[in-house]
Image (cartoon, rainbow, N blue to C red):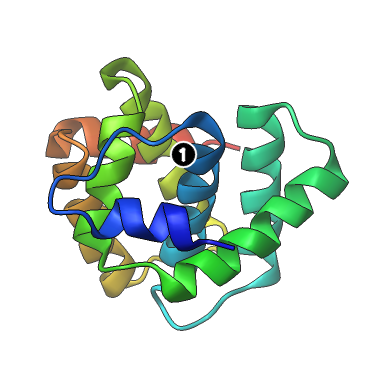
Amino acid sequence: MFAEILRSLLAPAPPRLADPDARLALAALLVRIARTDGLYAAEEVERIEKILMTRNGLDAFEAAALRAQAEELEQQAPDTVRFTRALKAAVAVDDRAGLLEALWSVALADGQRDASEDQQMRLLANLLGLTDVESAQARQRADRP
């Protein structure tokens, strides 16, 4: 089911992902950041689905189905570096801050800041070509009610 997207992610220089694959890869990265602290909380699941509905114009059922697929892909996906590089190629420069904001939103959804999540977010910002300042701004936007 995920063979094509996994093959793309494992390539030495991942190609630009087609839109449906990029959408699934983003969802899987959201799942990965949610699982980073070892707790995949209901608040994080809800936040992921809300992000998927907003970013992709999905209804609740479609977002839940995409999240379920993303959970499977995340378990099979390569290391975060290759995974994020493929997303970087798929997401326009102007949209990467929004992507980072979505990632921060999931990381903060359970109401706890975890050192492993902070470390992962620093890595993701760097891999997406964003600065620490841009990451801090994305975190602040994501932390607003």
Is residue 97 left or right of 49 when viewed as pictured?
Answer: left
Residue shown at the point (77%, 54%) measured from the top left: 64
**Relative to the observer, which residue lies in front, 98 or 15?**
15
Looking at the picture, how far across and down is residue 99, in whole percent? Answer: 41, 35
Is residue 102 left or right of 136 when viewed as pictured?
Answer: right
Residue shown at the point (46%, 32%) measured from the top left: 18
Residue shown at the point (47%, 67%) measured from the top left: 74
Is residue 63 left or right of 67 when viewed as pictured?
Answer: right
Looking at the picture, how far across and down is residue 12, in whole percent? Answer: 13, 53
Q: Quadrant of the rendered structure where residue 126 is?
A: top left
Residue shown at the point (35%, 31%) measured from the top left: 90
Query: Where 4 falls versus 51 (above or below)?
Result: below
The answer to whether residue 112 is seen in the rendering is no
Amino acid on which the number 1 mark rests in the picture: Ala
**Relative to the observer, which residue lies in front, 97 or 24?**
24
**Relative to the observer, which residue lies in front, 112 or 28?**
28
> Circle 1 — which element?
helix
Looking at the picture, how far across and down is residue 8, in whole percent? Answer: 32, 51
Q: Residues within 10 Å of mark 1 (few under 14, many from 20)?
A: some
Looking at the picture, how far across and down is residue 76, in whole percent? Answer: 44, 74
Instruction: Say which quadrant the N terminus sits in.
Output: bottom right
Q: Which residue is mark 1?
A: 22
The answer to whether residue 45 is seen in the rendering is yes
Instruction: Say which quadrant the C terminus sits in.
Output: top right
